[in-house]
């Protein structure tokens, strides 16, 4: 893969990943609510989900999903339902001031990892994105496996860096959420955004 192609891929992926979406919103929510270490579990789960989607795309299922309207609709509605469920859960969360002690986690790390994993897997449009993106940067005359490995590892690296930046930025906001009324507003704002993302996904076209 030529260097200029790889650099163009980095720019393209960075712009997409840095655009706030439900995944980043979940990381910010967990960082504020539970702390840095628990949020890292969410980031890890999200990264694993993205990796799974890239592997599925490499196996050709992304193209199959693009060709099957029924499969796309089913997965899309399932993902939308999960986002709405997550939004309702966040909306109804207790308005407890975010003053998590070091080393204390209110929820198991495995649960936070699962939340991140399901968040990544909840959007079938990511499969279509990878199915459309990867061929633009792959040289058909070179090893496709090697090129896919480079593209996937680059994407995951950028994903982890951007998620970590969102995490650190979120922790700076923690002192602002030391009052119950502000926490309640935060819960309802982020919960409403998750529901909004779910509705947009459910109504979206391919």
Image (spheres, rainbow, N blue to C red):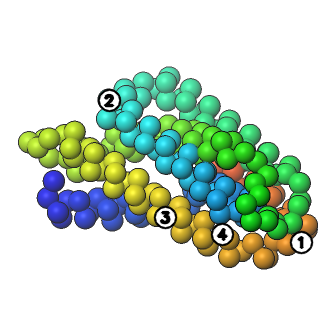
Residue under label 1, please give it: 179
Is 133 positioned to the left or the right of 80 in the image? Answer: left
Q: Describe the element under mark 1 as helix, strand or loop.
A: loop
Give the image location of residue 76, x and y in percent. Answer: 56, 34
Distance from Cα at disc 1 to Cα at disc 3: 28 Å
Q: Nearer the viewer, residue 70 or 91?
A: 91
Q: Residue at x 49, y 64 (%)?
A: 162
Residue 123 can be seen, yes or no: no
| Classed neighbour count for the residue bearing mark 2: other residues with Cα under 10 Å, few (<14), some (14–19), many (≥20) | few
Give the image location of residue 174, x and y in percent. Answer: 75, 72
* 19 in relation to 176, above or below: above
Residue under label 2, please give it: 60
Residue under label 3, please give it: 162
Say whether disc 4 or disc 1 marks the residue closer to the N-terminus. Answer: 4
Q: Describe the element under mark 4 as helix, strand or loop.
A: helix
* 45 in relation to 174, above or below: above
Question: Which numbered tag is attached to residue 170?
Answer: 4
Instruction: Name the residue at the left extreme.
Output: 141
Distance from Cα at disc 4 to Cα at disc 2: 37 Å
Residue 101 can be seen, yes or no: yes
Q: Residue at x 62, y 31 (%)?
A: 78
Is 179 positioned to the left or the right of 199 in the image? Answer: right
| Picture quadrant of residue 80 | top right
């Amino acid at each position: 893969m030529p260097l200029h192609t790889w650099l163009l891929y980095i720019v393209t992926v960075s712009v997409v990943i840095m655009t706030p979406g439900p995944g980043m919103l979940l990381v910010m929510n967990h960082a504020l609510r539970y702390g840095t270490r628990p949020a890292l579990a969410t980031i890890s789960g999200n990264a694993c989900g993205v990796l799974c989607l890239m592997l599925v795309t490499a196996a050709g299922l992304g193209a199959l999903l693009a060709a099957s309207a029924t499969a796309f609709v089913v997965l899309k509605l399932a993902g939308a339902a999960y986002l709405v469920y997550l939004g309702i859960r966040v909306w109804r969360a207790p308005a407890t001031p975010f003053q998590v002690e070091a080393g204390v986690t209110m929820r198991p790390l495995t649960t936070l990892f699962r939340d991140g994993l399901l968040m990544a897997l909840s959007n079938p449009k990511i499969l279509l994105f990878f199915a459309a993106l990867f061929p633009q940067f792959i040289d058909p005359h070179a090893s496709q496996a090697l090129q896919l490995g480079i593209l996937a590892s680059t994407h995951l690296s950028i994903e982890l860096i951007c998620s970590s930046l969102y995490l650190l930025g979120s922790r700076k906001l923690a002192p602002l959420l030391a009052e119950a009324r502000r926490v309640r507003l935060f819960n309802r704002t982020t919960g409403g955004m998750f529901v909004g993302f779910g509705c947009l996904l459910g109504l979206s076209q391919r």
